[in-house]
């Protein structure tokens, strides 16, 4: 039985040898282990700069990922967000020395998060590797189900 993501109307569509009906899905939630994405970083010569790229497990660059950089120390209320470019790259300029949390999010992937330290005389290059994660948009609900019947019983 094949299900499609089309869930718009509540009527039956009839074709020559089969029909599609909107039926209530009776699925039970399945417990699956949560995948983990990772962040790796290293020091660079670019002072006060955090650069990086976002990739998937196959090494493909992921564009338009949300990248956040937030200070860990309470006195410095530093927080910046941006999207990675079409090549999966991002740059945060004028970052003061200290400890920061780098987090990367993208729809369909598990979030990646790690702490980095920006030194007075160096910057940080970050590589985030994102792991695909299955998504359930509305849980169990209604969906199109193809019902095969003989042509004389279609109507």
Image (tube, rainbow, N blue to C red):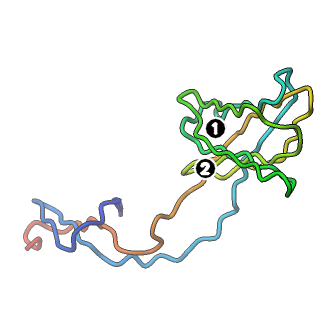
* Residue drawn where x is 68% and y is 45% of the image: 80
In the picture as drawn, the residue positioned furthest to the front comes out as 75
Q: Is 65 located above or below residue 2 in the figure?
A: above
* Residue drawn where x is 30% and y is 61% of the image: 6
Q: Is 151 located above or below residue 104 in the figure?
A: below
Q: Is 144 located above or below residue 108 in the figure?
A: below
Q: Position of residue 33 (x, y in %)?
A: 70, 62
* Residue drawn where x is 82% and y is 46% of the image: 100
Say left or right for 117 vs 154: right
Q: Could you say whether the residue bearing mark 2 is in a helix, strand or loop?
A: loop
Say left or right for 57 vs 22: right
Q: Position of residue 145 (x, y in %)?
A: 30, 67
Q: Quadrant of residue 30?
A: bottom right
Q: Are marks 2 and 1 in contact (CB under 8 Å)?
A: yes
Of the 4 image quadrants, the one containing the N terminus is: bottom left
Nearest the eye: 62 or 13:
62
Say left or right for 10 vs 49: left
Q: Could you say whether the residue bearing mark 1 is in a helix, strand or loop?
A: strand
Q: CA–CA distance between discs 2 and 1?
A: 9 Å
Q: Position of residue 48 (x, y in %)?
A: 82, 30
From the image, tell me which residue sits under label 2. 109
Q: Residues within 10 Å of mark 2 (few under 14, many from 20)?
A: many
Q: Residues within 10 Å of mark 1 (few under 14, many from 20)?
A: some
Q: Position of residue 43 (x, y in %)?
A: 88, 28
From the image, tell me which residue sits under label 1. 56
Nearest the eye: 25 or 111:
111
Of label 2 and label 1, which has the lower sequence position? 1
């Amino acid at each position: 039985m094949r299900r499609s993501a089309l869930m718009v109307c509540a009527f039956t569509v009839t074709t020559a040898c089969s029909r599609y009906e909107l039926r209530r899905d009776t699925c039970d939630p399945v417990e699956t282990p949560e995948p983990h994405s990772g962040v790796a970083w290293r020091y660079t010569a670019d002072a006060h700069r955090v650069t990086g790229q976002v990739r998937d497990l196959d090494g493909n660059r992921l564009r338009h990922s949300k990248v956040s950089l937030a200070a860990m120390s309470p006195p410095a209320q530093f927080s910046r967000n941006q999207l990675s470019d079409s090549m999966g790259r991002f740059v945060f300029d004028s970052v003061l020395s200290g400890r920061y949390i780098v987090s990367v999010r993208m729809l369909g992937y598990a979030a990646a998060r790690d702490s980095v330290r920006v030194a007075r005389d160096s910057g940080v290059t970050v590589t985030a590797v994102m792991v695909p994660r299955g998504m359930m948009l509305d849980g169990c609900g209604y969906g199109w189900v193809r019902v095969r019947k003989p042509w004389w019983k279609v109507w």
